[in-house]
Image (cartoon, coloured by chain):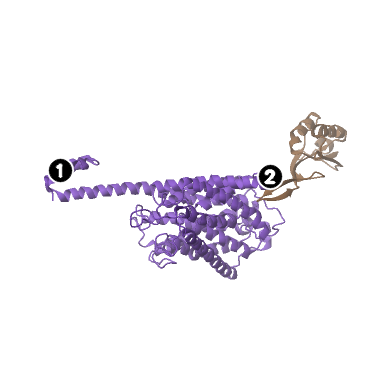
């Protein structure tokens, strides 16, 4: 109903697209449908602008996360092994880039993010059926395919992390089969439980609403615990621990670690699923935790051994990045510094003391850094999460944000986090053991002692990483 | 003809090479080696654990010289390489049965 008093609303129409509005104002008295059409067009333009910003950041983030695997992790792990195993170590990460992509497209995405039950998704999105360029329930401002490809990069790096535990002694064929199965039967269910619609641990409506921003439990606890299981199942490398097996190239590891640090901005800040202020929070927290943890590990090592090593520095940074992963979009920057320092000290302790005392050969400390760091980070998230950064649990009836973490007033969150961690440990322990057993019986997991001594580059790939003769 | 093998500290290579050239010895073969005598190694850290590295980098120079140049060669090497500390290295001398220049079949001392 347009009355003359409505003309007082005219100034509002002067704000955006002027020409269209100029045409409309003349006809305001009698053209309600035309005005509504203009408003609808405007709203669509605003949505397009937001999608443009968000999608740009998300595609960049997806690329950054892939960079973390190739060449970030490939170099980080590659430099830490002996020269005769450099190529095989890098091939393991690279193989994940190929294999997991195909599995994800065929079934992995559907199992993780499709609609099923509280523990696993359905198969409605097999072969990416129904996954188009329109928005999804998970990320309303970006195409679902962007969401899918972003999550794929997480699915790729998670099994690649496990390779650190069985470095230098696992058959390439067995590794490919084992990790492919792991991706479908451990990763996808865990991703579904934490992030999928109706998931058991989903922060919106899950049975134990868990705060896991970018995958502390989904990625790091699962890969870390699975790494421990694999390291123990496979047994120690020949000559461990008496023979010294120092990194053959700390230079490569250093480069890899720095690529991981930068790539992690895509891992954590991209998990905001938009390019707004939450992404900024996560970005800052990520960086602060990495820096603080590098310092924490370095100082601990300096006191413990008398000298700070480059390996300690970069391992510390990675430990901090792992620990902040679940917390990155929930905590304040000063909390991120604290989480980082704690992670640096705790993970260095796990690696220096616990590993040598218990005697398992977790070759590249996948458990010590990812398993332990992820567990610590998940629990600290429950303590330091505040609704002022991210009102993850919505608002109460009066419109006030519900408290998220312990310091926010929600003591029970620590219990929820513990539940998430326990489930991650459980599914990893059981799933990995079962899969290892099956693959071992069918193919055999470990290379022969002669092949292990000659090095996997030669025995598995018929190649040498370096040729110093030509 | 005598073969002179000298195991040296890598940092002394340039000085010894120059001293030998000045003494009139031009042909030599240089090898990168690892080893130790009575010299202890050093410790390195990996993941908080200390371990000893006792194969140390060395340089080995091999040359075959006419008999009359033996003392000049030894003086040149020792003059350039000696520091007085453990780890200076060693010189070994053995006799050589034959020497042949591949280019033109020259034999004996003229081939050196």
User: Which mark is drawn over residue A325?
Assistant: none
Q: What element carries label 2?
A: loop
Residue A166 appears left or right of B94: left
Looking at the rendering, in which quadrant would you find the C terminus of chain A?
top right
Q: Is mark 1 on a helix, strand or loop?
A: helix
The correct choice, above or below, for A422 with respect to A259 in the image is: below
Residue A333 appears left or right of B81: left
User: Which mark is drawn over residue A306?
Assistant: 2
Q: Where is residue A167 in the image (x, y as percent from the top left)?
A: 61, 57
B59 or A438: nearer the eye? A438
Q: Chain A's colour?
A: purple
Residue B20 appears left or right of A372: right
The number of numbered discs placed on residues in the rendered structure image is 2
Q: Is residue A252 visible?
A: no
Q: Which is more N-terminal, label 1 or label 2?
A: 1
B80 or A415: nearer the eye? A415
Residue to which mark 1 is pinned:
A7
As drawn, the residue found furthest toward the top would be B22
Q: Position of residue A257 (x, y in %)?
A: 56, 47
Q: Find the distance from the CA under tag 2 to the CA under tag 1.
A: 79 Å
Residue A138 lies in quadrant:
bottom left
Q: Position of residue A332 (x, y in %)?
A: 46, 47
Q: Chain B's colour?
A: brown
| Chain of the residue under the numbered disc 1 shown in the image | A
């Amino acid at each position: 109903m347009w009355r003359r008093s409505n003309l007082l609303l005219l100034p509002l129409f002067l704000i955006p697209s002027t020409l269209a509005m100029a045409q409309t104002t003349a006809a305001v008295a009698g053209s309600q449908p035309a005005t509504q059409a203009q408003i609808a067009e405007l709203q669509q333009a605003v949505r397009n602008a937001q999608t443009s910003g968000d999608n740009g950041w998300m595609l960049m983030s997806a690329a950054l996360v892939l960079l973390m695997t190739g060449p970030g992790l490939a170099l980080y792990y590659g430099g830490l092994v002996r020269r005769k195993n450099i190529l095989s170590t890098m091939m393991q990460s690279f193989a994940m880039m190929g294999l997991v992509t195909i599995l994800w497209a065929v079934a992995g995405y559907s199992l993780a993010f499709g609609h099923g039950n509280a523990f696993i998704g359905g198969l409605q999105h097999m072969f990416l059926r129904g996954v188009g360029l329109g928005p999804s329930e998970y990320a309303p401002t970006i195409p679902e395919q962007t969401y899918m490809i972003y999550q794929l990069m997480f699915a790729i790096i998670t099994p690649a992390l496990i390779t650190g535990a069985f470095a230098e002694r696992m058959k390439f064929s067995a590794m490919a089969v084992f990790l492919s199965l792991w991706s479908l039967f451990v990763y996808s269910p865990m991703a579904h439980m934490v992030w999928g619609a109706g998931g058991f641990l989903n922060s919106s409506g899950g049975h134990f609403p868990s705060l896991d921003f970018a995958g502390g439990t989904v990625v790091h606890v699962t890969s870390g615990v699975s790494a421990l299981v694999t390291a123990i199942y496979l047994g120690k490398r020949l000559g461990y621990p008496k023979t010294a097996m120092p990194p053959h190239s700390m230079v490569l590891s250093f480069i890899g670690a720095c690529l991981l640090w930068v790539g992690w901005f895509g891992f954590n800040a991209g998990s905001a699923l938009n390019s707004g202020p939450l992404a900024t929070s996560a970005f800052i927290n990520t960086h602060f935790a990495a820096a603080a943890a590098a310092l924490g590990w370095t100082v601990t090592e300096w006191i413990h051994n008398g000298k700070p090593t480059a390996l300690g520095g970069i391992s510390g940074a990675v430990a901090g990045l792992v620990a902040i992963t679940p917390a990155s979009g929930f905590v304040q920057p000063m909390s991120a510094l604290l989480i980082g320092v704690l992670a640096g000290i705790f993970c260095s302790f796990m690696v220096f003391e616990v590993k040598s005392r218990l005697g398992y050969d977790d070759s590249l400390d996948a458990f010590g850094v990812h398993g332990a760091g992820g567990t610590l980070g998940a629990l600290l998230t429950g303590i330091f999460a505040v609704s002022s950064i991210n009102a993850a649990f919505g608002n109460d009836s009066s419109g006030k944000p519900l408290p998220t973490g312990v310091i926010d007033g929600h003591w029970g969150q620590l219990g929820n986090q513990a539940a998430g961690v326990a489930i991650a440990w459980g599914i990893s322990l059981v799933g990995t053991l079962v899969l290892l057993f099956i693959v071992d019986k069918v193919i055999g997991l470990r290379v022969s002692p002669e092949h292990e001594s000659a090095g996997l580059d030669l025995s598995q790939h018929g190649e040498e990483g370096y040729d110093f003769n030509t | 003809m005598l073969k002179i093998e000298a195991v040296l500290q890598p940092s002394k290579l340039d000085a010894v090479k120059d001293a030998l050239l000045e003494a009139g010895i031009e042909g030599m073969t240089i090898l990168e080696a690892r080893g130790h005598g009575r010299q202890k190694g050093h410790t390195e850290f990996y993941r908080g654990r200390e371990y000893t590295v006792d194969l140390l980098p060395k340089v080995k120079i091999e040359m075959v010289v006419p008999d009359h140049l033996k003392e000049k060669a030894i003086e040149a090497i020792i003059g350039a390489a000696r520091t007085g500390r453990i780890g200076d290295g060693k010189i070994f001398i053995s006799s050589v049965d034959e020497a042949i220049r591949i280019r033109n079949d020259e034999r004996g001392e003229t081939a050196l």
